[in-house]
Image (tube, grey):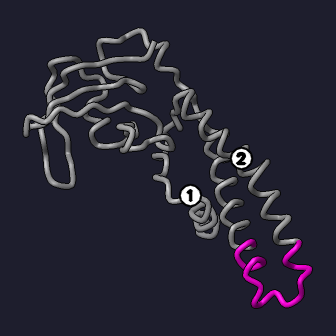
Amino acid sequence: MTSQTTHDDDDDDGAPPIPKGAKNYMTPAGFERLNAELRQLWDVERPRIVEVVSWAAGNGDRSENGDYLYGKKRLREIDRRVRFLTKRLEIAEVVDPKLQTRRDQVFFGATVTYERESGAEVTVTIVGIDEADMERGEISWISPIARALLKAHVDDEVEVRTPAGRETIAVLEIRYPG
């Protein structure tokens, strides 16, 4: 069991694990982004690196051959990412937020504006674990803020547990695409 866990950890690519028993929810856009990355790695980048490694291997001494050594390292990185993406896409459950009928409540795919205790307004979109990107305001559905917001309505106050402690936030707006 330990060796399997270690092997799986090698393929995790630094991404947060999917909670045991949870589904790998993903938006259609996130699913397509990961699929596009997988296709790019497999169809474009990997063949190009294989070609460089093959060429470099034919140049003799591999121990000091930078193209060969870098190429082999890059191939391992690509293969690890391909394994990770393949596993995550195979278990993905695509949820289209455009189809949400209960638009008065926070569910997966919602864009929520809330007010922090400091008075600052923050807008986030709740997305899948593998598509979260704070720079775009996209947070994972398993994050503390998303968990606190799920099932809330406008004007609800919810408590968020953060590393800095507990904070009460107020839901100001809930939107869904479409």
Return the x and y of residue 30 as percentages of the image width and height.
Answer: 54, 34
Question: Which label was assigned to residue 128?
Answer: none
Mark seen at residue 12: 1
Residue density around tag 1, few if under 14, some if 14–19, many if 20 or more, within 10 Å: some
Q: Is residue 67 magenta?
A: yes
Range shown magenta: 55-71
Residue 104 screen position, x and y as percent: 29, 12
Q: Which amino acid does label 1 sit on?
A: Asp
Question: Pointer 2: residues within 10 angstroms few (<14), some, or many (20+)?
Answer: few
Residue furthest toward the top?
101
The residue depicted at 15 percent of the width and 18 percent of the height is 155
Query: Which is nearer the eye, 117 or 151?
Result: 117
Q: Earlier in the sequence, mark 1 or mark 2?
A: 1
Q: Position of residue 71 (x, y in %)?
A: 74, 71
The residue that disc 2 covers is 40
Q: In this view, does 64 lie above or below 152?
A: below
